[in-house]
Image (cartoon, rainbow, N blue to C red):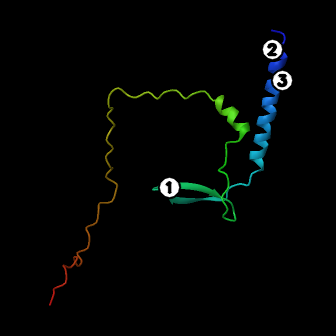
């Protein structure tokens, strides 16, 4: 058991070293300035492009922030009411000005007469 502990520590250290190199490589990649949608084979494919229009690797989640996402507790389920509730109806007060009738104007004309 005593020999497993140093090997486990060494393995975890090598794992952290390898993953940190990959994280550093992701940070060094050029940022996407936009995206282009290509219709290929009957489906739409979104490709990230840089400022010159050259395709780049799509952005990844920041490895520093991904770990913090695991620490967020799950949201509680929303309570659904068992029955519909009635809302009080709101009636307008009398101090609102009455609607003015529309001015009688020309109605829309019919189709032109052929002839």
Residue under pointer 3: 10
Where residue 74 appears, x then y in whole percent?
Answer: 57, 28
Give the answer, above or below, for where 103 lies relative to 51. Answer: below
**108 displayed left or right of 86:** left
Q: Which of 106 and 59 lies nearest the eye of the viewer?
A: 59
Ranked by sequence position, the earlier of labels 1 and 2 is 2
| Residue 67 percent coordinates (x, y) | 70, 32
Please state which of the two labelled residues, at mark 1 or mark 2, is closer to the viewer.
2
Of all residues shown, which one is farthest toward the top?
1
- Give SS at disc 1: strand
Which quadrant of the rendered structure holds the N terminus? top right
Q: Position of residue 111 (x, y in %)?
A: 19, 80
Q: What secondary structure is found at the residue carrying circle 3? A: helix
From the viewer's perspective, is residue 12 above or below residue 35?
above
Q: Name the residue that disc number 2 marks.
A: 4
Residue 65: quadrant of the picture? top right
Badge 1 is on which residue?
A: 44
Outermost residue toward the bottom in this view: 115
Tell me the residue at 52%/26% (across/down). 76
Q: Earlier in the sequence, mark 1 or mark 3?
A: 3
Mark pair 3, 2: CA separation: 10 Å
Name which residue lies at 33% across and 50% down: 93
On screen, residue 89 above or below 74? below
Residues under labels 1 and 2: Cα distance?
Answer: 51 Å
Q: Residue drawn at (79%, 37%), measured in percent from left and top?
A: 20
Q: Nearer the viewer, residue 109 or 19?
A: 19
């Amino acid at each position: 058991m005593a020999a497993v502990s140093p090997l486990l520590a060494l393995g975890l250290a090598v794992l952290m070293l390898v993953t940190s190199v990959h994280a550093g490589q992701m940070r060094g990649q050029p940022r996407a300035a936009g995206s282009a949608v290509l219709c290929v084979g009957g489906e739409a494919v979104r490709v990230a492009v840089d400022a010159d229009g050259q395709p780049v690797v799509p952005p990844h989640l920041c490895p520093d922030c991904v770990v913090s996402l695991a620490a967020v507790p799950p949201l509680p389920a929303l309570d659904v009411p068992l029955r519909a509730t009635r809302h009080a109806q709101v009636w307008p007060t009398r101090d609102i000005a009455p609607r003015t009738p529309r001015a009688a104007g020309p109605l829309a004309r019919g189709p032109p007469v052929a002839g």
